[in-house]
Image (cartoon, rainbow, N blue to C red):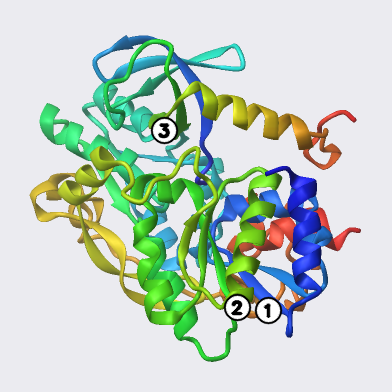
Amino acid sequence: MKLAESMAAITELAGKLTEPVRLMEVCGTHTMSAFRSGLRSLLPAEVSLLSGPGCPVCVTPNRYLDTALAIAGLADVQICTFGDMMRVPGSSDSLERLRARGGNIKVVYSPLDALAAARRQPQRRVVFLGVGFETTAPTVGWTIQQAAAENIANYSVLCAHKTMPQAMAALLDDPSLRVDGFLCPGHVSIITGSRIYDFICRDYRRPCVVAGFEPADMAEAVLMLLRQLSEARAEVEIQYRRAVEPTGNQAARKLLDDVFEPADSEWRGIGIIPGSGLAVRPKYQQHDAARVFAAIAVPAAVEHQGCRCGEVLRGAVPPTACPLFARTCTPSAPVGACMVSSEGTCAAYYRYAAAR
Amino acid sequence: MCLAVPAKIVALDGTDATVEMDGVRRPANVAFIDRPAIGDFVLLHAGFAIRKWDAENVREYEAMVNETRRPDPAAGEAP
């Protein structure tokens, strides 16, 4: 469906709403697309888009960063990471600052590059920072399987992978938040399939639409949500039909199941959500950095004074409600994780909304 | 972080492939793709193909991008 057709239909349906609706996009890539395209500002006043906890860098807690920094301080270690993690502040330091002081930290495009670094440097322990949702976890899991198969003993992953549906349920369990429907993440759903959201519709009576990332995709998904709400339906629908099926990518799901097991996981701003993380299974413990470096001392994590990233991540407040936003916290000198990542809600607000 | 971009498989050796995106070639892993073949379009995430696209999917995507694509000065693109 063309963008203009969707927008016209949204405007017409919005005029018939009895009360305003709040829809949440739970993927950071959706957040960026909605801001960058102007979709957010084009929606009628009755329809608001909230940004959820879908930026993996943003929801990674200080304790994980602090552990990565402690491991990075060891003489025989090379840390490999996606670039997004470099500037995320831990309790008192960041990977970028540690690298500037001589830390051996390498930015990679793919976990395959980290595995190749381990192959090339058998004398060094190479640790990949495994951060991301179900889209990314299979790619990291594949390197763990491969390291085991090739006996690359010096490769391990510090795993902070998270799964999305439990976080969506945790938000709905919070009585202070109101979310009327979800734009579900398109690329997570390529791996998982759309059926993972069935329980949101069944148990919470909220409609879910799996959306693509172009402005026209997102507008059509908003329209599909409004139609469901106006007809009092709560179903899982797929807008991103060119990529997503109900059952997902079987090979990737099988690999996820082989390498990882569900675990409780800490989300910045939300706390520990039972079963919302992925831990490396014991049979691959040689490649699990949490076990390899279990003895390392990590000081207790300290949160940044005044930072409201946690509430922003839950959609409870907009970034502009934070006293640090655009004052002491900017993209060039970020205090909170949501300002660091280009997909973070604060960074998107700063770049596309606050200045205009 | 969950970005995925369309790419075309131009060489293949087991699960190791070379893909092309906008004229740029790079290595990719196709372990998650059922019966990959040279000429297939795939969606690429972090060096891995996570989904095969048929020609109709690619056409739909290109039409959609062309409908709304404008340069973004905030991202450093010339107007």
Q: Residues within 10 Å of mark 3 (few under 14, many from 20)?
A: many
The answer for which chain carries disc 3 is A
Look at the numbered disc 1 and give the secondary structure of its residue: loop
Q: Would you name the residue on which mark 1 appears?
A: A317
Q: Residues within 10 Å of mark 2 (few under 14, many from 20)?
A: some
Residue at the spot x=48%, y=58% of the render? Answer: A237
Residue type pointed to by label 3:
Ser
Q: Would you name the residue on which mark 2 appears?
A: A311
Q: How many marks?
A: 3
Residue type pointed to by label 2:
Glu
Relative to A280, residue A231 above or below: below
- Tell me if I can see residue A73 in this picture: no
Residue B74: percent from left, percent from top:
82, 42
State the residue in front, A68 or B58: B58
Residue B34: percent from left, percent from top:
27, 27
**Residues marked 2 and 1 touching at CB (< 8 Å):** yes
State the residue in front, A123 or A328: A328
**Residues marked 3 and 2 touching at CB (< 8 Å):** no
Residue at the spot x=61%, y=31% of the render? Answer: B61
The answer for which chain carries disc 2 is A
The answer for which chain carries disc 1 is A
Q: Would you name the residue on which mark 3 appears?
A: A110
Residue at the spot x=15%, y=54% of the render? Answer: A281
Q: Earlier in the sequence, mark 1 or mark 3?
A: 3
Relative to A10, residue A154 above or below: above
> Residue extending furthest bottom?
A175
Q: Is residue A155 left or right of residue A4?
A: left
